[in-house]
Each structure stands twice: as C-alpha cells, then as structure tokens.
Amino acid sequence: MTKLRLAIVGAGPAGIYAADIILKAEKQFDVSIDLFDHLPAPYGLVRYGVAPDHPRIKGIINALREVLDRGDIRLFGNVHYGTDITLDDLKQHYNAVIFATGAVRDASLDIPGIDLPRSYGAAEFVNWYDGHPDFPREWPLDTSSVAVIGNGNVALDVARMLAKHADDLLTTEIPANVYSGLKASAVTDVHVFGRRGPAQVKFTPLELRELGELNDVDMVLYDEDFEVTDAASEAAIATNKQVMVINRVLNSWRTRETGQASRRLHLHFWSKPLEIVGSAESGVQSLRYERTEPDGEGGVRGTGEIREVPVQAVYRAVGYFGSPLDGIPFDEHRGVIPNREGQVIDDNDQVVPGVFATGWIKRGPVGLIGHTKSDAMETISHVINGQADWWSPSHPSPESVVELLESRGVEYTDLSGWHNLDEAEKALGAPEGRERIKLVDRDDMLRAARGA
C-alpha cells in the first residue's frame, strides 16, 4: 500500500477537520499525518477568537478534542512555520502539505484617522481578552465613550465585552489579567455603527439576543433608523426567518425603558464612517459619519448629512485578513493563498506541486464550521488525486521530523503536553468553580505542558 506522509500547518478547526476527513475516508493509501501549530495549544480561533462568554460555541472544541484524542494524528505545537520548520524541510519529510493557517489579522479600513492613537483593530482586542500569548497583557480601557465599526458577530462580541461588567464574566475561562483590566474599565457608552439598515445586519439572532441580556446595560436604539426602509428590507423581514427574528428583537428593545443602567450600548444604523477625528497628541476625539439610505439596488448611498459623535477610542470590526507564509504564493488584495479548489497556484496560474490550502486562508474569512468541513473535503480530494505531483521526501520516517526539531532546540508540545496544559488550566479554575482559567504567558504554557 502506498504511503502518504502529510503535513498540515494550522491546528484550528480547518486543519483538524482536514486530518479527520482524510483518515476516515482514505482506503488506498497508508496515511500518516503531522499537525503543526505556532501556538502551544490547538484549536485556533475556537480558543482565541471566540468570546469567553460563549460556551455553546466553544462546545466545538469537544468535537475537535475527540479527533485529536484518537491518537492517529501527531500534534506539534509551538512550532513556527518559516523558522522552526521551513517549506524545504517539509519537502524532505512529507509527500504534501496543507496550509490551514486561517485569518487572524484585521482587515483594513481606509478612512482618515484610522491610525490615530486609540484606534484599534477588533482582532487585537479579541486576542487580548482571549488570552493569546503573543499579544500584550494589558489593554487601555481608560476612556468613557468608544465606537465599534461593523455590523457582524465580531462587532457584537467586541461591543458586548466592552459594555459587560467584569464580574459577570467570572463564570468563564477569562484570564486573571483580562478580568483585572475589564474590572478597572472606565467605559460607560459603546456606540456600534453600521452602513446599512437593521434588515441588512450580519448578526446572528443568538448573538443579538445575548447582547440584550447584559446586566446593568441599557440598549439604546434610535427611531429614525427604523423609519428608513425599502422594498428589499421589507421583503427580507417578511420572508427570511433570521431577519424576521432580528427585526423582532431590535423592535422589542425600542420599547424598553432606559436611563437606569450605569452603561449604555447604542446601535446606529444607516451610518457610514467617514473619518476618525483627533490628533497624534490627543488620540481619537470623535467619529464623523454620514447618514445613508437605500439606493434601490440592494446597497446604500450617502445622504450628504454629516454627523459626529464624541468618542475617545474606535474599534474596527470589518473582517479578518490572512497573513503571507514563507515561500507560498499570497494574494495581497484578498488575504488568501491563491488556489484552485484547494490546489495552490502560482503567479502564472500553474498548480504548485504538493502544496494545498483549506479553511479561511483558502477561501477568505467567511462561512461557519459546516463550510470548513466541505472546504476540507474539496481540498483532500485533490491531495488524493494529485499523487503525480507529490513530493518525494528523502527522510520520510516519522522519527526524522522529531530529530529535526530537537536538533534545532525547538521546544514543541505534543498531544500529551497539550493534555498536561489542559489539566493545568482546569486545576486553576477548580477552586473558583470554573471550568478553567486560561494560562496566557507562553513560557507558563510550556512549563505546564512539561508537567511542571
């Protein structure tokens, strides 16, 4: 039976699902898979991109854990592609590689003032409150009014975490430094801005409902935003169940009494950000925006009415963006690895032998877990059928990769090390009745992985 030595770079859902699918489906090859990640812990954005008060979403981890715990996939955590292991190294040890590195950077927003002090990308804030080891331990929350630009679930997560009282997060896995930072927060007003109307938001009903359940936080909506409508919006409300629910939730908030809570979360629709006003010395001082209206073709157009709201910080939540990988083609405009159904292609539109992609680095930061699985299946079919383009490794034995990493002094974590880290975090949470408390510092994570 032909052997297939496969490397997968990225141990988030995309990488783990790809490994699981090929191991379950493939019968004609003897498949051996090594999964690499630059973090000491697996699960990618499920661990570092989901707000800590979303235990239902984090339940995805249970399914991923089952795949890894079968023991037929080797895990190498804390291994940096491009330095600890290179493309040339992979060619010497594997027949092919699948990149599943996701998209973790913030997409850009090209408006004046976006680079002012206290203007942030949402992903930076998410990585802070999720305890990512490569991000600062402290976050400046010393201003009273902040703006969040975006009308998707990430924007809601950011707005909710900014408005929520820290003590209401003590049942979650929130790290100690994040709790301390949120506890000292001076934020009282969070303003969320979207270019389109209430019927065009990208929120899911579940996320939206959770926003309205915040303790001691008033939901502030503006009647004028619901007076602007068009045929497309009315049709969406009448025929799309998700839009119908969102419309019902938003309108229920409009009838609530406000004025008693210590914090407020304002939702602004039909509002296109034009400029972040401020200076290099003072930082953000306000957000200038233009009122919009339906253009009759499914989009919006400016009305010419310019408004300004005083804020001292701005978070842009306008999407994620992929990062280039050493030696691999990259589309700087879309933030993805250029590919044809998962087969990586070069600048001449030619397939790059032995190199594949799956997940967000393949298709961009869109779609849910179901898309990730179908995505992986498409890529895997080309891995299997592309045997003629496989590499011919000179050192294909599984032991040779371990020897390579050890010869370079790479302090990698394996599956047992992840189990040790997992248990250490659970032990931290147990005295407080919490499932876990995340370790944040990379050295602390590695010590825990060693059982220290």
Image (cartoon, helix red, strand yellow):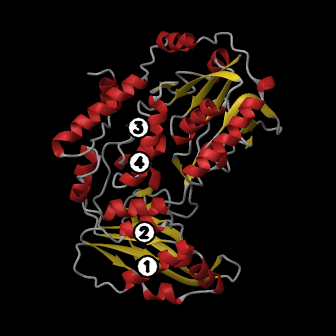
> Considering depth in this image, is 240 or 445 the residue closer to the camera?
240
Q: In front of the other: label 1 or label 4?
A: 4
Q: In front of the other: label 2 or label 4?
A: 4
Q: State which tag comes first along the sequence, 1 or 4.
A: 4
Let me know if residue 329 appears in the view: no
Residue 155 vertical placement versus 194 (above, below): above
Do the residues bearing badges 3 and 4 touch, measured as CB atoms within 8 Å? no
Image location of residue 194, percent across then percent down: 51, 72
Question: Image check: 188 left or right of 66?
Answer: left
Label 1 and label 3: CA atoms lie apart by 37 Å
The C terminus appears in which quarter of the rendering? top left
Q: Secondary structure at mark 3?
A: loop
Residue under pointer 3: 134
Q: In front of the other: label 3 or label 4?
A: 4
Q: In front of the other: label 2 or label 3?
A: 2
Residue 91 vertical placement versus 303 (above, below): above
| Kind of residue sitting beneath label 2 | Leu
- Residue at 44%, 48% in the rendered image: 49
| Kind of residue sitting beneath label 4 | Gly
Q: Secondary structure at mark 1?
A: helix
For mark 1, does the 10 Å Cα neighbourhood hold few (<14), some (14 to 19), or many (20 or more) residues?
some
Q: Secondary structure at mark 2?
A: helix
Residue under pointer 4: 59
Label 1 and label 4: CA atoms lie apart by 27 Å
Q: Secondary structure at mark 4?
A: loop
Question: Image check: 36 left or right of 342?
Answer: left
Residue 250, numbered label: 1
Q: Quadrant of residue 42?
A: top left
Q: Quadrant of residue 243?
A: bottom right
| Kind of residue sitting beneath label 1 | Leu
Label 1 and label 2: CA atoms lie apart by 9 Å
Do the residues bearing badges 1 and 2 touch, measured as CB atoms within 8 Å? yes
